[in-house]
Amino acid sequence: MSDPSSARRPVVAVGAVVWSHGRVLLIRRGQAPEGGTWTLPGGRQEFGETVRAAVCREVAEETGIEIDLLGLLDVVDLVAGGSHFTVIEMAARHRAGIARAGSDAADCAWVPPDDLDGYRLTGPVRRLIEASLARRDHVSGLNGG
């Protein structure tokens, strides 16, 4: 029988589709995996931390802003290169602060949905933004702030 503590397991991570004045917040990754690519802010959940607290912390660490969470968008499994991340993605709106790259982000930008093609987003990131856009009128506060 194998030792369960040595078994490979998925890592729980979080992310957010953050809106402000009709624009979505993107970060450019500064480190592996996929350094230099544009994506949504997020990262690993820490032991003892709630999902909601992890999303707010990760967005603050990577962009310097505070957010209000609006609800669950999706749960996405990313399996590649020997790693498995289960990412809990939330919709959010900007509450305070000026977005600036921090932590492992090399850059960040508020992007109008019509300009997303210039950022070469992966399929999962694009689908999350589109899912959030589809729910804009149904999720309280997404059009404001």
Image (tube, rainbow, N blue to C red):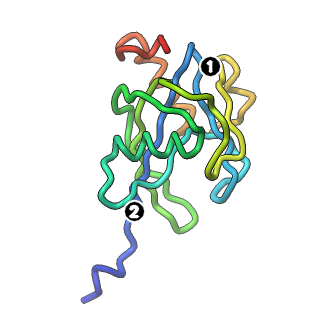
Image coordinates for residue 88, horizontal then vertical, percent: 39, 44
Instruction: Tell me what residue is drawn at x 33 percent, y 53 percent.
Output: 49
Structural distance between the alpha carbons of marks 2 and 1: 31 Å
Image coordinates for residue 50, horizontal then vertical, percent: 30, 48
Neighbourhood count class around disc 2 (C-alpha, 10 Å): few under 14, some 14–19, many 20 upward = some
Q: Is residue 118 toward the left or the right of residue 84 in the image?
A: right
Instruction: Tell me what residue is drawn at x 61 percent, y 40 percent.
Output: 39
Image coordinates for residue 78, horizontal then vertical, percent: 49, 53
Q: Residue furthest front?
A: 97
In terms of depth relative to the viewer, which is nearer, 8 or 99?
99
Q: Is residue 51 toward the left or the right of residue 129 in the image?
A: left
Q: Is residue 117 above or below residue 89?
A: above
Which residue has dot 1 on it? 113
Which residue has dot 2 on it? 10
Quadrant for the N terminus in the image: bottom left
In terms of depth relative to the viewer, which is nearer, 71 or 122?
71
Neighbourhood count class around disc 1 (C-alpha, 10 Å): few under 14, some 14–19, many 20 upward = some
In terms of depth relative to the viewer, which is nearer, 42 or 81?
42
Indicate the secondary structure of the residue bearing disc 2.
loop
Q: Is residue 119 toward the left or the right of residue 68 in the image?
A: right
